[in-house]
Amino acid sequence: MIIQPKTRGFICTTAHPEGCAQQVQRQIDYVSAQPAITGPKNVLVIGASTGYGLASRIVSSFAAGANTIGVYFDKAAEGARTASAGWYNSAAFEDAAAAAGRKSYSIVGDAFSDEIKAKTIDLIRTELGQIDLVVYSVASPRRTHPKTGETFSSVIKPLGGTYTNKTVNFHSGEVSQATIEPATEDELRQTIAVMGGEDWQMWIDELSAAGALAEDATTVAYSYIGPEITHAVYREGTIGAAKNDLEATAKRLNEQLGAAGGRAFVSVNKALVTQSSSAIPVVPLYISALYKVMKEKGIHEGCIEQMYRLFSERLYGSSETAVDEKGLIRVDDWEMRPEIQAEVADVWAKLSTENVYELSDLEGYRREFFQLFGFETDGIDYEADVNPEINIHNLR
């Protein structure tokens, strides 16, 4: 079939297998050109098919030479429907890992469930013995609690009061005002249940109890803080409350694992074009302004550059991992430089529909959005007939 992008709001409902494979290969090529990392040997990535999770798996395998297991919830092609981008990404990763002689396995299913945790633990014990790095990079709008059966849904809302600020339709380029009503107490509770640290804690507890986690294992989850422009809807909103819970979980896990030489961290990463960030009002416009400033300064990074820097300079680059006063790893440090933020704030004040393409990198944002799904990738013939049914090597 000939596959073209079909969008619904901030979601692309189709994906291109060859474009996704090309994007994965570019990340592998970048990592392979960097100095090797002496680090983890057996890595579990929970939420491994896109964004920072996928980049973490690529760095683990192709920079550190590690064996990996990826857990993710993606769908294969069916009838006239293409597979999800994460399915195609994972298929390309598994093929490349096999060609490079790395052990790699994929488990597809609900990472929140007891069933997938048990299946993953059985695979670890059978094929790898123990895991020495657990990356928790789950991004989901819903979670069904494995013990109570309650299904929670997350919301992106401010707390305490109505929030209004600029936003952009990155398809049309229209800059407008977004107004978001504050979350209720129940919406806040549910968002924390989905995006907080409880499931991460469950994974570590079950891995430890099963003997599948090495005594000196490291675990890391990902977060974002961002500038004052986005705080009301992000860091001081429902998502921020969930991230506070995630960071509190990291402290507990660090104490729990530390007795045997293990470590737990939250890494605060740079704002990037992801399926998740595209859903948050205000954020796409901020990222577009940020991209232009950082690209002009020569310090722009994508997911793969961020994760290589995290692994090579922070997690495994020295005997002691550098953290801030709250114990957080900050690879958003280039984004948050005062001179960068001052310039972005100046741009932000001027942005309008008439000048958004001139003052920001909205075109770059839009292109990267489609590249998440395998489109607008150089070297791909999008008029060619392609087979959407791609198998994943080592799918368990």
Image (cartoon, helix red, strand yellow):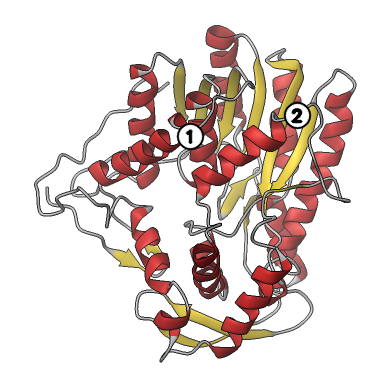
Residue drawn at (57%, 38%) of the image: 308
Residue 202 in the image: state x and y as whole percent: 72, 33
Query: Where 361 sits versus 163, above or below?
Result: above
Q: Where is residue 257, by image quadrant?
A: top right
Per the image, the residue denoted by label 1 is: 109
Q: Residue placed at 47% from the left, 76% from the top?
A: 360
Quarter occupied by the C terminus: top left
Nearest the viewer among 379 and 93 is 379
Callout 1: helix, strand or loop? loop
Earlier sequence position, callout 1 versus callout 2? 1
* Amino acid type shown at disc 1: Gly
To which residue does mark 2 refer? 318
Which is closer to the viewer, label 1 or label 2?
A: 2
Image coordinates for residue 179, horizontal then vertical, percent:
60, 85
Q: Can residue 242 be seen in the rendering of this structure? A: yes
- Where in the figure is residue 265, as x and y percent of width and height? 76, 39
* Residue drawn at the location 64% of the way across and 40% of the way down: 310
Vertical placement of 182 versus 124: above or below?
Answer: below
Q: Can you give x and y, in whole percent of width and height, for residue 261 in the image?
A: 84, 20
Q: Is residue 267 left or right of residue 49?
A: right
Is 68 drawn above or below residue 284 in the view shown?
above
